[in-house]
Amino acid sequence: MNKITAYLKKRAITAPWRIDGLPAGRFGGAVVIPSLAESENLPGTLRSLAANPPELLQCYLIVVVVNHRCDASREQQADNRRTLERLPAWKNEFNLATLCWVDAASPGLELPPRQGVGLARKIGMDLALATLTTRGDDPLLVCLDADTTVQPDYLQALLDHDTASAVGGTAIPYRHRPASDPAGQEAIDRYELFLRAYVLGLELAGSPWAFHTVGSAMACRASVYAAAGGMNKRLAGEDFYFLQQVHKVSGVAPLTGTVVHPSPRSSWRVPFGTGRSVGDMLTDGPKRLMFYDPKLFELLGDWLAGVGESWTMDGAAMLACGFGVNRALGEFLQEAGFGDAWDGIRRNNPGNVRNRKAFHDWFDAFRTMRLMHRLTDSGFPRQAPELVLPPLLQKAGIPCRTTAVPDMLAALRRRQGA
């Protein structure tokens, strides 16, 4: 039994949901789109997909998961009914022969309480995986959102990357669409700059977790999806934890050749993320979102460099090294049980290469972010982007004309392929 078969048998969602409007044929992948009250935005997403070459469109299922929880508002329920009613017409209007959908919104099919986008993505990806027939290779599972548009080179870039990449996970370049007013533009620019500054800081520190985790801009091969345990069911942050697991299994590589364009709108649907951050800034002002002190990335870099030179040391000695870099870092590692974990890593993973991977699987993206929070609370408060970005940009050799947020964002977009 291969990994995909085992996953479908033991861990995949198979009921009560199903794919409606499923076309006949053999497909090399699926683009999965969760949709919650998106009857006004989804047509734009489908129209952008339809601009891709017909010969590539016929190779991909496009699976829209229309969903809401059983406690959804009347407005959300009504909007989803409109979406389900209009999907057959949109299939014809946009000439998307491979468009199909999952009803996770009608009575008896709603999501359980306290569930959301993670479960919606999982439903679509699991059902698509069970449906796909391959052409000798792994089918590709692609995540998109119902308020996100793509370019006409989107599917070609995915195909080219999948053919050439040595790893099974993909982070797709993204750039938020312009907002409808100056306040909204200021908020989305600042939020996107925050995301990009964090990834740049990790890159400069030598962290293997220096890639973007945006739910509408990620993909992986089916075998990797199965080996990673599939999509998680988190209400928010599902993209972060999913790509973290994909990276542990097979690695995540940035794609080139296209850019996806998420919405800049505010939203209160999830406890954190783009929509919530934009909404907070529109309510409380841009200073609601401050940036990590660049010294934190220097401390992280010192710690990671020390680890890379210390494979012969035992856990107690390594813990002492952590305290030597920074007391708060040492306390963080001690509380996380790093000393025993390090001894186990050395014992079970002979050789520096295996040691390194096992260490970074332990000191993963989540622990890295928790450390950043811990250091922030231990004498390194967050700062304005005008103070944080210049030293990071200078260290990375990235030219930038001014310290204005739009200029620094443009510089980082160029650096990060967007």
Image: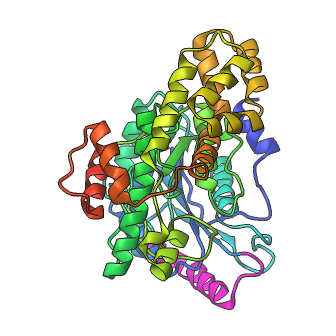
Q: Quadrant of the N terminus?
A: top right
Regarding residue 223, the answer to whether it shows in the image is: no
Determine the main secondary structure of the stretch shown in magenta. Answer: helix
Asked if residue 70 is among those painted magenta in the image, a careful observer would answer: yes
Q: Which residues are magenta?
A: 69-92
Residue 289's spot in the image, x, y percent?
48, 66
Residue 340's spot in the image, x, y percent?
79, 24
> Could you say which is closer to the camera, residue 328 or residue 418?
328
Asked if residue 208 is among those painted magenta in the image, a careful observer would answer: no
Q: Quadrant of residue 181?
A: bottom left
Residue drawn at x 45%, y 42% as measured from the top left: 295
Q: Quadrant of residue 314?
A: top right
Residue 92's spot in the image, x, y percent?
44, 73
> Could you say which is closer to the camera, residue 9 or residue 208?
208
User: Taking 143 as reference, is 384 left or right?
Assistant: left
> Could you say which is closer to the camera, residue 302 or residue 113?
302
Residue drawn at x 64%, y 62% as measured from the top left: 236
> Could you say which is closer to the camera, residue 279 or residue 404?
404
Q: Is residue 400 above or below residue 97?
A: above
Residue 355's spot in the image, x, y percent?
64, 17
Residue drawn at x 45%, y 54% as measured from the top left: 195
